[in-house]
């Protein structure tokens, strides 16, 4: 029992002893910490080199003998004479012999001005405490041989023109000079408010010897397109990277340490002028080195491109306009479809498509291109003249206004079946009934199926007709055709097959297939050599069919070629036309629009 009491007492004594030690440590350290917080807040500044060459970079170190937040140091607010390239912070706390020492360090990379003179840094105030003051001496670039020998990197820039018009392209060439092997790095592009900046071409690498020192030279080209006028400043590009810091104490240079390096090019003033006072108010502003506008007949670049100058009334003519400009971006080019719509043309209707834009780079320049295809439908016989198309532009090389012109085009239009005034024929708007759709196979698949089944149908149908005509030849020969007459009509069987496919194309509202099948059917059933849609309408002489064919033609050659929903209405008009003209098409019995289910 006594041994157990002694053991419990020993354990309790150990706990009490630990509490006494903690209390003693607290009594010793707390006053020291309080004393540290009450100590003067010393602020010290220093630079890594002085004097320094104009345009070079320095590292400003700000040391505060206290833990402070990053918000306490705002270099851009107090260093207006310098360009701040970056800043970092670190904190350190030490306890030595019961004394606590805290410290905050800020490292800020500054680019010194290009003017050679003396600059004062400080005093800098942080949380109510002022720092010391530094007199920084900036020497002219290249004036001090010792400074030149110490330089590890610097950047230079050149611009093609320091005075430009708004939206005019400026070329900026950046050169990075490195006196050490590059480990890794990045070039931050130049900065300009309200401007389009992009790199053109790829970087090039060369070498130069300056004052007996070899430098690697990396060249990069930028294009700057300012979007507003006024006096502006281009902030030069900045290089941030790592270089190999070779040490003489190592036998393996590849394992040597790296050194962080930051340098920047000088800022560049730029004057951006507004549009010339005499520029036409109704023309888009287009500054460029070169602009050309061409036109061709037919689909440019394909076998359909032609020099044909004679067409038939109602036959479509395709014109291809191409606008090419050196300098501006694609979205700076004027819209050719709007310019074409402003042309005054008599005897034809124009249907411009949506223009296509593209751009590429060549020899450090942007080349933009816009292509527009226009379908022209002649409505009158005689001479058709398409006026020349003009685009105003500003020549940035000669600094004068200029005009790019696509020459006028003249065509001879032969008389055809097209009505003289298309506007006199009203076009029905799509109705709810006309937009009804049903699930059918595609027209292309049906054409293939009909081709495969045609010979089988002809053979089976011919045998059936021969057998039937043999039975009834005696007592109904005056009312039925002979076997010889029936065998002499295979084109009518083809026309009937085309009508089945035409019905499916109409129900699917497929404008391209409908037009193709209509022309094929008209050549076989109506004997038309030139199976234009207008010729079909004149052959059948049906007003409503003419309206539907005109609407189909307008949808086919308008910009929205797939916006045709009048398939059912066209099919019904064709049915009515054939019923009213039995002499012109005695054997054309149209299949029902919706066949009755068996």
Image (tube, rainbow, N blue to C red):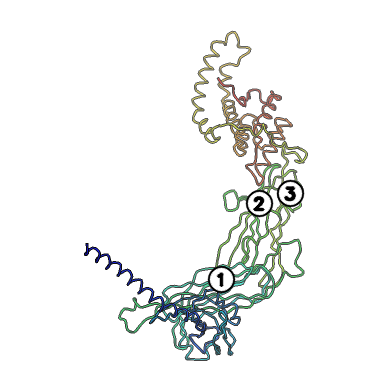
Q: Which residue is mark 2?
A: 319
Q: Is 85 placed left or right of 286 in the picture?
A: left
Kindly report the distance in space between the C-alpha atoms of the residues bearing marks 1 and 3.
48 Å
> Which of the two discs, 1 and 2, labels the residue nearer the N terminus?
1
Label 2 environment density (alpha carbons within 10 Å; few <14, some 14–19, many ≥20): many
Q: Is 349 placed left or right of 68 in the picture?
A: right
Label 1 environment density (alpha carbons within 10 Å; few <14, some 14–19, many ≥20): many
Q: Nearer the viewer, residue 542 or 15?
A: 15
Q: Are marks 1 and 3 in contact (CB under 8 Å)?
A: no
- Disc 1 is placed on an element classified as strand
Kindly report the distance in space between the C-alpha atoms of the residues bearing marks 1 and 2.
37 Å
**Coordinates of residue 4 in the picture (x, y in percent):** 23, 63
**Coordinates of residue 191 in the picture (x, y in percent):** 59, 72
Kindly report the distance in space between the C-alpha atoms of the residues bearing marks 2 and 3.
13 Å
Q: Is residue 59 visible?
A: no
Q: Quadrant of the C terminus?
A: top right
Q: Is 187 placed left or right of 339 in the picture?
A: left
**For the residues carrying marks 1 and 2, which lies nearer the camera in this image?**
1
Dividing the picture into quadrants, the one containing residue 425 is top right
Image vertical order of residue 67 relative to residue 329, above or below? below
Q: Nearer the viewer, residue 24 or 502?
A: 24
Q: Is residue 55 visible?
A: yes
**Coordinates of residue 73 in the picture (x, y in percent):** 55, 77
Identify the residue at image location x=37%, y=73%.
22
- Disc 3 is placed on an element classified as strand
**For the residues carrying marks 1 and 3, which lies nearer the camera in this image?**
1
**For the residues carrying marks 2 and 3, which lies nearer the camera in this image?**
2
Q: Which residue is mark 3?
A: 384
Label 3 environment density (alpha carbons within 10 Å; few <14, some 14–19, many ≥20): many
Q: Nearer the viewer, residue 128 or 21?
A: 21
């Amino acid at each position: 029992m006594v041994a157990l009491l002694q053991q419990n007492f020993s354990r309790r004594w150990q706990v009490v002893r630990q509490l006494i030690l903690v209390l003693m440590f607290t009594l010793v350290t707390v006053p020291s910490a309080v004393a540290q917080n009450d100590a003067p807040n010393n602020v010290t500044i220093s630079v890594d080199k002085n004097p320094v060459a104009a345009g070079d970079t320095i590292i400003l170190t700000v040391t505060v003998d206290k833990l402070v937040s990053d918000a306490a140091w705002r270099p851009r607010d107090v260093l207006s004479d310098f360009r701040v390239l970056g800043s970092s912070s670190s904190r350190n706390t030490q306890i030595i012999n019961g004394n606590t020492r805290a410290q905050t360090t800020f490292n800020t990379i500054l680019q010194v001005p290009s003017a050679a003179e003396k600059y004062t840094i400080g005093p800098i105030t942080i949380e109510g405490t002022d720092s010391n003051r530094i007199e920084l001496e900036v020497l002219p670039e290249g004036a001090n041989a010792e400074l030149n020998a110490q330089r590890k990197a610097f950047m230079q820039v050149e611009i093609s023109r320091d005075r430009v018009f708004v939206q005019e392209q400026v070329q900026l060439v950046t050169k990075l000079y490195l006196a050490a092997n590059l480990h890794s790095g990045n070039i931050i592009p130049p900065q300009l408010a309200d401007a389009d900046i992009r790199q053109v071409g790829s970087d090039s690498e060369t070498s130069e010897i300056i004052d007996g020192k070899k430098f690697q030279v990396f060249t990069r080209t930028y294009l700057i397109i300012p979007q507003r006028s006024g006096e502006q400043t281009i902030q030069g590009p900045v290089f941030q990277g790592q270089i190999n810091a070779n040490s003489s104490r190592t036998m393996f240079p590849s394992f040597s340490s790296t050194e962080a390096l930051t340098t920047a090019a000088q800022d560049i003033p730029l004057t951006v002028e507004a549009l010339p006072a005499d520029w036409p108010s109704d023309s888009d502003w287009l500054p460029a080195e070169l602009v050309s506008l061409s036109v061709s007949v037919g689909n440019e670049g394909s076998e359909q491109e032609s020099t044909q100058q004679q067409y038939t009334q109602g036959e479509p003519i395709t014109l291809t306009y191409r606008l090419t400009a050196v300098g501006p971006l694609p979205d700076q080019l004027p819209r050719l479809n709007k310019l074409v719509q402003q042309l005054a043309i008599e005897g034809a209707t124009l249907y411009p498509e949506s223009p296509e834009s593209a751009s590429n780079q060549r020899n450090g320049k942007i080349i933009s291109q816009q292509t527009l295809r226009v379908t022209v439908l002649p409505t009158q016989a005689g001479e058709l003249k398409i006026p020349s198309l003009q685009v105003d532009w500003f020549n940035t090389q000669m600094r004068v206004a200029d005009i790019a012109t696509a020459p006028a085009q003249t065509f001879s239009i032969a008389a055809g079946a097209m009505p003289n005034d298309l506007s006199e024929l009203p076009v029905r708007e799509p109705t709810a009934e006309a937009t009804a759709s049903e699930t059918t196979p595609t027209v292309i698949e049906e054409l293939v199926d009909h081709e495969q089944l045609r010979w089988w149908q002809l053979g089976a149908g011919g045998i059936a007709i021969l057998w039937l005509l043999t039975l009834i030849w005696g007592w109904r020969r005056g009312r039925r055709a002979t076997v010889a007459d029936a065998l002499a009509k295979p084109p009518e069987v083809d026309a009937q097959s085309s009508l089945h496919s035409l019905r499916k194309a109409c129900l699917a509202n497929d404008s391209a297939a409908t037009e193709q099948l209509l022309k094929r059917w008209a050549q076989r059933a109506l004997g038309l050599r030139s199976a234009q849609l207008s010729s079909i309408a004149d052959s059948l002489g049906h007003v409503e069919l003419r309206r539907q064919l005109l609407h189909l033609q307008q949808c086919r050659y308008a910009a929205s070629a797939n916006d045709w929903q009048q398939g059912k209405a066209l099919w019904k008009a064709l049915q009515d036309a054939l019923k009213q003209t039995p002499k012109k098409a005695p054997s054309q019995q149209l299949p029902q629009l919706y066949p009755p289910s068996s």
